[in-house]
Image (tube, rainbow, N blue to C red):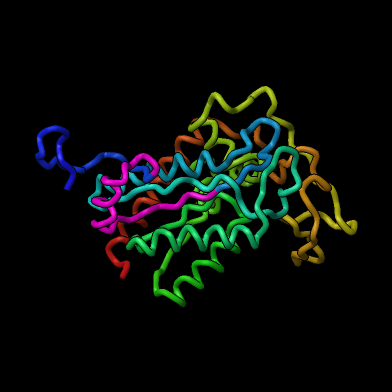
Amino acid sequence: MPQERGTGQAVGVETDKRRLAELTAEEARAVFARRPVVLLPLGSHEDQGPHAPMGDHLAAGAIADRVAARATARGVETYVAPTLPFGGGNFFATTVGGIALSQTTMRAVLEDIFASLVDQGIDRLIVLNGHGGNVEPVNDVTRTLYRRRKVLVPSLYLWRIGYALLPEILGPETAKRASGHGADPLTSVYWHLFPDLVRPDLVPEPIAPGRVLDLPMAGFGTVSFEGAEVSVPVAVDEISPNAVLHGDARLSSPETGAALVDRLVERVTRFTVHFAGRAP
């Protein structure tokens, strides 16, 4: 028990902090002994269109902060691990200014992060993922962790949830037009959370992506052939001059972002509370 300086009397180590990075070592010892839920936000640093900041990890971290506060207020003590700002390299890894980890490196980093926490008794972990290139390594590493140590780590892909929420907010037709890389949900989320970082003057008009094998692009790294999606090993800069794909960022707004963030935070908070009550 720490002692008050100069008195020899013990003082409490309770804290209202929600970020592990802000805890002192003594606070961390007290917190870890209570076996809280810890959120691990993941993102990337890549081209998000000419109008939006490259670090989507900023949004993942901001959402995690809000989830931790809301879940704690509902009786589930929750903290946020430092956000991993670099993601696993994928379709967007070649964009100018981007910083990506190889999939092998991403797996190794995740393995070490989980091992560090689990070895200290933190085994109620939830991944809040904000980058498609992280999905595969997260799945691989968490599956191995569960098989070897029986620690079950769920992962929520934030923007996949965001895509599903857009029709509730914008209506089905507008949501379909707004959805895409370099557009919604992330542009609106940015606009709400970080309005000073968004450049409305640089929001582009949508353009059709280039073709590969004379076939239209169907998704990120896939083309459409007779209704089937076929994976092709191309990079975004080969088919789009500005990394905007399939969405119209002119339909994005801070109001949409506010609605998305509130619903995302609420959905993830409810899952966190559910998980905490059932995790072994």
* Left or right relative to 231: residue 158: left
Q: In which quarter of the image is the C terminus?
A: bottom left
Q: Residue at x 80, y 45 (%)?
A: 237
Nearest the viewer among 277 and 223 is 277
Please report the residue visible at 60 percent of the width from the left and 58 percent of the height from the top: 106
Image-based side of 25 in relation to 157, left or right: left
Residue 208 x, y percent position in the rendering = 80, 43
Locate residue 49, reporting x and y percent: 69, 36
Q: Is residue 119 magenta?
A: no
The residue closer to the viewer here, 209 or 3, is 3
Q: Where is residue 255 in the image (x, y as percent from the top left)?
A: 49, 31
Residue pictured at 63% horizontal, 41% vertical: 178
Residue farthest to the right, as pictured: 214
Quarter of the view holding residue 181: top right
Above or below residue 71? Residue 203 is above
Looking at the image, is 265 positioned above or below residue 205? Answer: below
> Which residue is painted at 39% across and 63% down in the image?
118
Rendered position, 216 above or below 73: below
What is the quadrant of residue 152 in the picture? bottom left
Residue 44 coordinates in the image, percent (x, y): 60, 46
Q: Which quadrant of the structure image shows residue 55?
A: top right
* Boundaries of the magenta span: 21-42
